[in-house]
Amino acid sequence: MIRKTWVLSLVGFLSFPFWLYGGTVATYRFSATTPPRPGLSGNGITDLYGNGPYLWIGTGNGLSRLTLSTRSFETFGPQQGLGHGSVAAIWAHGDTVIVATATDTVTKVQATPLPKGTGLSFSFDGGANWRHVAQPGPTPVQNLTYDIAVWRGVVWITSWGGGVMKSADWGASWQEAPPDSFNFDPYGKLNHRGFSAVSSGDALWVGTAGGINKSADGGLTWKNFNATNQPKPISGNFVVALGHQEHAGEEVIWAATWKAEDENESYAVSRSRDGGLSWRTCLRDEKAHNFAFFDSLAYVATDNGLFVSDDYGETWYRFPEMVDVARDVRIYSNEIYSAYADEGALWVGTADGLAHTSTNGYWWDIFRAFVPTGKEGEKRTYAYPNPFSPMRHNQLGGDGFVRFQYNTRGAARVTVKVFDFAMDLVKTVVEDKFLAAAGDYAEVWSGRNDYGDAVANGVYFYSVEIDGDGTYWGKVLIVN
């Protein structure tokens, strides 16, 4: 896929801090900025970054910004100056926001799609204007930015194919910065394959396929911590996420440490309270994706739910299912990808939408992206995901779930049924369900029949019978 060179406004051009470096920016072009479109961009929430009045949300369909005071969403894409594809990483501070995007590509020798970075976008005015730069690095294949950190005015990014790179001029130029004394080699040296980065007060930390690396001098020298080189080591050498917690006068480094090549390694969370000299492992066998912190609380997003600890990982509590009781909506996913915590608020990014609680998980608000039904030429009902795999999509409690989206034009009673290709009844999903007001609604089906058996692969039809309105039909393809 060919990526366009996206353009930005003259107003943003004049406000860009060119004083940080001499010369012009060859990779930028400038033009009018298109306002963001309303709504949440997608339901696979890969990254969350809170910043002042906003929560920045990375999804598989682009970048969204939630204004916390109004609970309103806006979405940014190529029309606003971002690269094509999914959001791979976010960093924000004050009015400065950096977003990395990525997509899939194929090569002449590799038919299977491989990830490809589509660049980084910079905003210095809270998202009003954006500047986009092409993905830096020696190769476009498997070179996407997994993480972003800024330490002492220098931007650091991590990538598998591009390694660890830094920019002292906010993306105008980039320099390879492998976390050791060897020349950059992403294929021969595991420690050159970057995954994660975070800054603490006195150091930069980089997670790679070869452990955790710490530098206190801007990358001139590094100290490596891996699964074998310490008496109390990390659990595994694939360090896919890093987090920095400050509390009660001390700094704690957290790492999502995954099993790499050694049989003695394991999946776990590793944390250090002494600058990396020793590590304690916890949540063993959990695949962690991300961290969030508030005071003494440390949150860990994993494949198996969201965990929290208030004693640096000595004990853990796993959050129960996330249910929006007021709207009878829940998160149908075990996988938690991201979290953000602030005073009195916890935001959770899942494979099935965004969840918020201000009551430590007793009550939830759930936000989900969907195409409204029955408006602007849209059908009155549709199924998603479609095709649907009960063994892969929206996994919760051993089942997968598909949604049947529909709308009512007033208070109504609704019945939803599923039929096979011969129009024999397979499952009554809901019967005579009362809805008190007009709006968009969704019912979920697990891909099982009325006897609890998993249905066979194939095409299934479903009906949405709305009392006093009519019966609307759709279909879903089951594929396992």
Image (spheres, grey):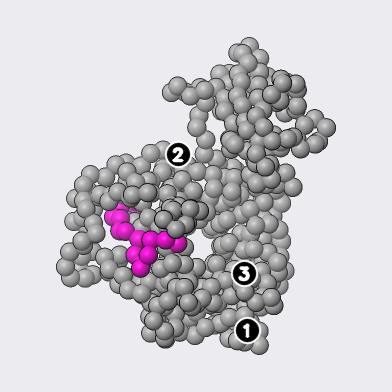
Is residue 128 found inside the magenta-colored segment of the image?
A: yes
Q: Residue furthest right?
A: 451
Report the disc number at residue 228.
1
Disc 1 vs disc 2: which is toward the camera? 1
Q: Main secondary structure of the magenta part?
A: loop
Q: At which x and y percent is residue 269?
A: 64, 70
Contact check, label 1 and label 3, Cβ < 8 Å: no
- For the point 26% across and 45% down, the residue is 33
Q: Quadrant of the C terminus?
A: top right
Which numbered disc, 3 or 2, marks the residue that appears first in the sequence? 2
User: 15 or 389: which is nearer to us?
Assistant: 389
Which quadrant of the figure has residue 453?
top right
Contact check, label 3 and label 2, Cβ < 8 Å: no
Mark 3: which secondary structure? Answer: strand
Q: Which residue is mark 3?
A: 258
The three-letter code of the residue at mark 2 reads Gly
Which numbered disc, 1 or 3, marks the residue that appears first in the sequence? 1
- For the point 27% across and 68% down, the residue is 173
User: 83 or 34: which is nearer to us?
Assistant: 83
Q: Residues within 10 Å of mark 3 (few under 14, many from 20)?
A: many
The vertical placement of 358 against 178, above or below, is: above
The vertical placement of 357 against 426, above or below, is: below
Q: Is residue 43 left or right of residue 120?
A: right
Disc 3 vs disc 2: which is toward the camera? 3
